[in-house]
């Protein structure tokens, strides 16, 4: 027999968590604050691009295991477990803004069943369970930390096949009850205190960001000394202490988590009296990478992009998602626009050209239209379909056969045989 669960917030984390918990046999009610979104979700219409999520949502709706309501207080009346999955945006000083979590906790507090458990699923600073406890103002309610480790583009797979499930609780009975929600998932279960659980999330993202910044710095060294970063990374990855995950050079890291969480961890450390210089360096290397890639595109275009058309393939921060938040591609495009470039772009996710984040960019519905008349093509997101484009056709419509491959994605030998000049990241 499954449990009754409420999910507050239907973004990436909330919607994935709700759909997957319903799939595991629980009865789940998800709440949001936008009526049109609630109505669409109850019709099985998914507002984000995420593999397998639409199928799970519709499965839950058909089975009566999943529903969507307007307003947090309307989701919690019968819930034994309440997941807080609301935004924690970055504040001006780098810290996480907890106002959404505090407001949600205050709203639901009068409506909770006695002995219900409130679960922090959002990424929150150390000590946030205390913040939620204070906002709830109820001694009969336990607050537990249960951080998410979902990757956009594979969030459903990650939830149902996790590397680990981490639960942080002062009350061991509450921890055991939350652990019971995940029965059937073959994954290590770690029960710890709330502060450690919250730190595990930040430390994990910061370490992954560090690996990416490191390999991008090594790519710069490879370009300087004439080495090939792909071979260097292959040789490193055979060492089991290092591994090959997240050792792939590119235009920099971004998305909804790494930038926010890295800055937040620097601020958490600062508030605790520790100067996290290493992580500051990781962030600085990432900013440098955006500039390095923009410089490379400008150089390949003939030394200046002023008044020149630059084609860009890839706008989202990674493939298999439609998320533009803190996209490295957009960071690089902004630098090119500042230098006077004309940008024609294509992304397989079909972004809305009216999106304010795409201001100044001509967003094309066809990849070949994007390269028409371009002096250089920059590949900035690792969509697989870019590997299989007809580069003979690309060459015919470009003003010059020049490619900057920001993901080392396409066949450089094949391009050079077709008369293209090609530059990747960290490749001689």
Image: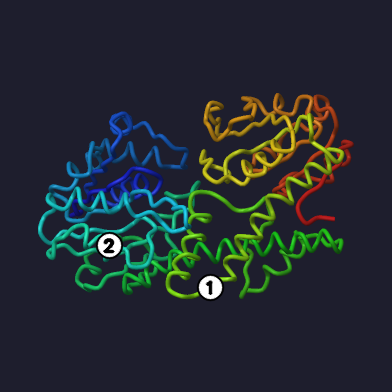
For numbered disc 2, what is the local secondary structure? helix
Return the x and y of residue 157 as percentages of the image width and height. 44, 52
Nearest the viewer among 214 and 308 is 308
Residue 131: numbered disc: 2
User: Exactly how many numbered labels are in the figure?
Assistant: 2
Return the x and y of residue 393 as percentages of the image width and height. 79, 27
Nearest the viewer among 66 and 355 is 355
Return the x and y of residue 239 as percentages of the image width and height. 66, 74
Give neighbour class at mark 2: few <14, some 14-19, many 20+ (Cα, 10 Å). some
Residue lying at 16% horizontally and 62% vertically, measured from the top left = 141
Q: Which of the 4 quarters of the picture holds residue 371?
A: top right
Residue lying at 23% horizontally and 63% vertically, measured from the top left = 143
State whether residue 374 is above or below residue 316.
above
Specify whether 209 is left or right of 425.
Answer: left
Residue lying at 80% horizontally and 62% vertically, measured from the top left = 222
Please identify the quadrant where the N terminus is shown: bottom left
Q: Comparing marks 2 and 1, which lies closer to the viewer?
A: 1
Specify whether 330 is left or right of 368.
Answer: left
State whether residue 355 is above or below residue 424.
above
Give neighbour class at mark 1: few <14, some 14-19, many 20+ (Cα, 10 Å). some
Nearest the viewer among 322 and 303 is 303
What colouring does the structure picture have? rainbow
Return the x and y of residue 249 as percentages of the image width and height. 69, 56
Nearest the viewer among 324 and 284 is 284
Q: Which residue is mark 1?
A: 275
**What is the distance, in whole Å, between disc 2 and disc 1 at their CAs?**
24 Å
Q: Which of the 4 quarters of the picture holds residue 339?
A: top right
For numbered disc 1, what is the local secondary structure? loop
Work out whether mark 2 precedes mark 1 in sequence or the reverse, and give the earlier one.
2
Residue 283: numbered disc: none
């Amino acid at each position: 027999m499954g449990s009754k669960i409420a999910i507050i917030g239907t973004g990436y984390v909330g919607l994935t968590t709700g759909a997957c918990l319903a799939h595991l046999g629980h009865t789940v009610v998800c709440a949001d604050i936008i009526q049109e979104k609630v109505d669409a979700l109850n019709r099985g219409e998914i507002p984000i691009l995420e593999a397998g999520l639409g199928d799970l949502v519709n499965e839950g709706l058909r089975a009566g295991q999943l529903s969507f309501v307007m307003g947090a207080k309307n989701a919690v009346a019968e819930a034994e477990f309440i997941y807080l999955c609301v935004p924690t945006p970055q504040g001006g000083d780098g810290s996480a803004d907890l106002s959404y979590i505090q407001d949600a906790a205050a709203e639901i507090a009068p409506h909770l069943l006695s002995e219900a458990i409130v679960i922090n699923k959002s990424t929150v600073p150390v000590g946030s369970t205390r913040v939620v406890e204070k906002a709830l103002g109820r001694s009969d309610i336990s607050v537990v930390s249960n951080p998410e480790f979902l990757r956009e583009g594979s969030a459903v797979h990650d939830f149902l096949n996790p590397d680990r499930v981490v639960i942080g609780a002062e009350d061991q009975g509450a921890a055991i009850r939350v652990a019971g929600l995940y029965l059937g998932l073959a994954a290590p279960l770690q029960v710890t205190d709330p502060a450690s659980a919250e730190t595990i999330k930040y430390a994990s993202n910061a370490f992954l960001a560090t690996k990416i910044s490191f390999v991008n710095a090594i790519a710069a060294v490879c370009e300087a000394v004439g080495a090939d970063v792909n071979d260097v990374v292959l040789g490193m990855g055979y060492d089991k202490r290092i591994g090959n995950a997240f050792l792939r050079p590119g235009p920099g890291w971004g998305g909804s988590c790494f930038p926010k969480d890295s800055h937040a961890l620097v601020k958490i450390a600062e508030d605790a009296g520790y100067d996290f210089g290493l992580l500051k360096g990781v962030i600085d290397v990432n900013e440098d990478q955006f500039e390095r890639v923009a410089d490379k595109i400008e150089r390949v275009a003939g030394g200046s992009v002023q008044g020149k058309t630059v084609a860009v393939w890839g706008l989202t921060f990674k493939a298999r998602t439609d998320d533009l938040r803190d996209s490295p591609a957009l960071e690089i495009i902004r630098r090119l626009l500042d230098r006077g470039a004309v940008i024609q772009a294509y992304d397989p996710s079909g972004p809305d050209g009216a999106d304010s984040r795409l201001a100044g960019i001509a967003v094309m519905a066809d990849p070949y239209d994007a390269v028409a008349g371009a002096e250089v093509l920059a590949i900035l997101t690792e969509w697989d379909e870019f590997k299989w484009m007809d580069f003979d056709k690309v060459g015919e419509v470009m003003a010059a056969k020049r490619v900057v491959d920001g993901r080392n994605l396409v066949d450089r030998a094949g391009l050079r045989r077709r008369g293209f000049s090609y530059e990747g990241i960290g490749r001689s």
